[in-house]
Image (cartoon, rainbow, N blue to C red):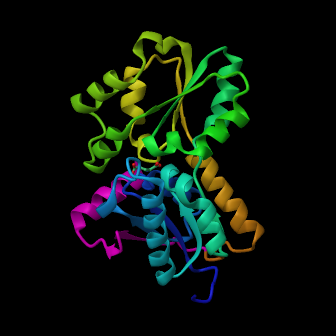
Amino acid sequence: MKRCTNEMNIGFFDSGIGGLSVLREALALMPNENYLYYADSDNTPYGTKTRDEVKKLAFRAVEFLISKGIKALVIACNTATSASVEDLRKAYDFPIIGMEPAVKPAVARSLNGGKRVLVLTTPLTLREVKFRELVTRVDPEHIVDGIPAPKLVELAERFTFDGPEVEEYFREILPWDKISCYGTIVLGCTHFPFFRDTLARILPQSIDIIDGNRGTVNHLYDVLKSKNMLNPSNKPGRVLFFRSGVPVEDPLLLEKYNRLLRS
Ligand code: DGL
């Protein structure tokens, strides 16, 4: 493995563009770091695959990022975290930060108001033991419901975040007959924060919409700081993008990625 220096990259990976919603938080908090972003677009979506398939893809992505030189890894994907974080941590000795749906803060908020929590995730995240254990740990009153929303991943990969197709899908999957029972909706997939504005428009204003991105990035910062691994440079860092191992050079696609990072 290459020698680790603090100027080295922080590797981010996701099945596609979802992890950009995490990377944009990282850029806001740590603009002087250098980042590699791996979108596994040849293999998206992960959420409808098996655990073993996703684990294999996660190792492939991480091996690629290691070959380019990383000092830490963010699995910017709830689904890949569920399927692979434990095995990745056993295999590698650099810091590995995973995602977890923000169920804990959602339960705290909703309990206060006597409301329920609705978690939107991929099908794989929802059926994984990691998610069930999380809910068991933080939801003693049984106020959490989960629903899979796989089509949002497909829509996001087409950069379709609003419009009739998106609204119709939300009309189809959300429990409208009891929507006023919910106080918080958790976006438990990193592709979903890009739909926040559309959701906010169609949901009652009383429902909070939250995700775990800020918490993950704060944790990344704390880990790097505690290990003295933050980049000491005071110049802005850079982001390099890869699609399933191939550098992204198409200016139109780069512009779309960068637009999401600025959104
Ligand atoms: N963005 C991913 C997540 O957070 C996975 C989406 C997919 O490929 O199904 O779960």
x, y (%) of residue 101? 57, 42
The magenta segment: 234-263
Specify whether residue 245 is painted magenta. Answer: yes
Q: Is residue 229 visible?
A: yes
Identify the residue at horizontal 48%, vertical 83% (top origin).
67
Q: Position of residue 132 (x, y in %)?
A: 62, 38
Asked which quadrant contains residue 167, the reply is top left
Residue beneath the point at 32% across and 23% down: 172
Foreground of the two, 91 or 202? 91
For the point 46% across and 51% down, the residue is 21
Q: Horizontal and vertical percent for residue 146?
A: 51, 30
Look at the image and tell me whether residue 122 can be seen: no
Is residue 192 located in the magenta-colored stretch of the structure?
no
Q: Residue at x 44, y 72 (%)?
A: 60
**Which quadrant is the N terminus positioned in?**
bottom right
Horizontal side of 244 relative to 5 (left or right) equals left
75 lies left or right of 48: right
Q: Up-down: is 262 above or below 146?
A: below
Given residues 230 and 20, the one toward you in this image is 20
